[in-house]
Structure formats: structure tokens, C-alpha cells
Image (cartoon, rainbow, N blue to C red):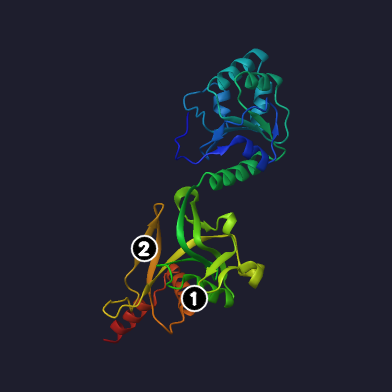
Amino acid sequence: MAARKDTPSLPLTELQADLDLENLTAPEFSEQKVTVSDLKRPGLELAGFWKHFVAERIHILGRTEISYLRELSSATRKKRLEKFFSFQPLAVIITRGIDPPAILVELADEVAVPVMRTARPTTKFISVLSAYLEDKLASRKIIHGVLVDIYGMGVLIKGKSGIGKSETAIALVKRGHRMVADDVIEVKSPGGQQLIGSAPETTRYFLEMRGIGIINVKTLFGAGAVRNNIGIDLIVKLETWQEEQSYERLGLQKDTETIMKVEIPKILLPVRPGRNLALVLEVAAMNHRLNNMDYNAAENLLERINNRR
């Protein structure tokens, strides 16, 4: 099945190299790509049930499947494998370093289906491969802002150019927090339930400060001042203070922003001279963590007031 152009894909050659897989068939499969992270152990299929065969998945053959094939008569084994490869599965990976029946490799070569092998146990390899594919095939998007790690929470700072995002990030680094990305942030969504932000490799650790220029945060402040990626837990939008604007004072109103179909809590932070933004962001991150633990200071205060009436 051909992948749509906008569908994330992974060349099998890259998967083979990254996971150190041994190729047992002809090596000419550079054009074949993985487009789904789901895996398949085709036990029922090899037993003769083909109704729900999914060809675009990687098929894993462990000790159980190979032992079953060996117990079949040579005629039945050939018939089952011919049927199996007639569906043109994307690839077959054999675990535990097992030597497959020779007919399996021969039939795979005939239809140009890659057969690879790993020495890892089946369950552990499936876990590693699933996590690897979830990461590689996750949807990606480029957004603009500054991403920082505050007390282990990923805080995305947004706002117009010149509002003070980068300066706030440096102030946070000076207070012991870590920078992840400045200006260009690559966001991916493994499983579609969480956002992971990182800096593109070419701009990683670099930050622009107006009036000074480009600095390397890792070189200037040390390896402990940066990290490569983090989940995005909170969005803080910086906005120039407007006297006529009514800003949230109690924290009872909740706002969110949707990125790649994932809703992220969001707060609007007015900026004016003399306000310590790094300190405010620290408090915002800690307060958000408390909210995640089902504690809301504003609600607690209102409850106390109501109890005194």
C-alpha cells in the first residue's frame, strides 16, 4: 500500500542500521518504507487463518512461530509460507538469533520481502521496536517560541518578536533551569496524546539575544543548562501590558491551546517594566503542577470564604 505524501515514513534501511539488524535476504530494499508503528506476530496466519492479514506491518517471528513451522511437514510448511509471502508483507524480523527454515528465506527472496534477524528476545525486541517506531513515525510540526525546562516541566514561551522570550529563558537558566529550544521548535506527537519539543540539530543550544547576538547556552553556562527535548506541559504567552485590558487575577478561568490535536493549558502573562518574568514563570510552573495534583489555590480560598459565611 503506497503511503500518502504527508504520512510520516521510515526507510527500512534506516531501521536496519539503527537497530543493528542482520539482513538474511537480498539487500536491495532501500525503497521500502515503514508507515505504521503497529507490529504483528503472525501465529494465526501461519496456522491457516488469513482473514485479517495486514501487509503494511512488520511481522515478527519468534521462537514459538519458528518452532511451529519446523513441526509442519515440508509440503505444508511451503504452502503456508507461499500464502504468507503472497500478501507481500513489508518485512519479517526473526528474533533470538534463530536460524529460519531455508524455504522461508528462499520464498522471501522471490518476492523481494526483506527478512532480518536480531539476537534480542522476542518480547524485549518488540518493546524496543514499538518505542522506536512511535518516535520515528510521530507527526511533526515546526512552531516558534522558546521552550524551557522549569522544575522538570516543559514550558513553551510564546509572544511577539522583541517581547523578551529569550531574555526570560536566560534568566531562568541563571536560576538553575534548562533551555531546550529558542525560536524554532520541532514538535512531535508520539501516539497523538503528548507533545515533545526539541530544537533542530543545526540550532540546538543556540539562542539569540538582541543587542548581543547569538550565544551558545551550553558553552556559556555548561551542559547542565540545556536539555535536548521535553514534553510540553504549559504554554505561557507574553503580551505587552495594556491598562484597559482585564487580566485574570484569581486563576479560576482556564484557557488552552490546541497544537496537533493536543490541548495544552495556557496562561496569558502581561509584561511591563520591572516585572521579574523568570520568577513569575517559576511560580506558574509550580502552580500548574499543583493544579495537576487537584489543588487550586483560588478554589481553596473561595471555599474558605464561603465556609466563614
Q: Which mark identifies residue 154?
A: none
Q: Position of residue 123 (x, y in %)?
A: 63, 41
Q: Around disc 2, counting alpha carbons within 10 Å, would you say few (fewer than 14), some (14 to 19), or many (20 or more)?
A: few
Residue 293: name its quadrant.
bottom left
Q: Give the x, y percent position of residue 307.
A: 30, 83
Residue 256's mark? Answer: 2
Crowding near pointer 1: few (<14 within 10 Å), some, many (20+)?
A: some
Q: Position of residue 220 (x, y in %)?
A: 64, 71
- State left or right for residue 110 relative to residue 257: right
Q: Residue at x 47, y 70 (%)?
A: 165
Does 129 sit left or right of 297 as displayed? right
Is there a contact, CB below 8 Å, between mark 2 and mark 1?
no
Q: Position of residue 241 (x, y in %)?
A: 34, 78
Q: Which residue is mark 1?
A: 282
Compare residues 211 and 222 and report the one nearer the observer.
211
Name the residue located 50 percent from the left edge and 23 percent from the top edge. 50
Distance from the alpha carbon under mark 2 to that under mark 1: 19 Å
Give SS at disc 2: strand
Instruction: Name which residue type carries label 2.
Output: Thr
Hey, which quadrant is residue 254 in on the image? bottom left
Kindly identify the amino acid type of the residue bearing the numbered disc 1.
Answer: Glu
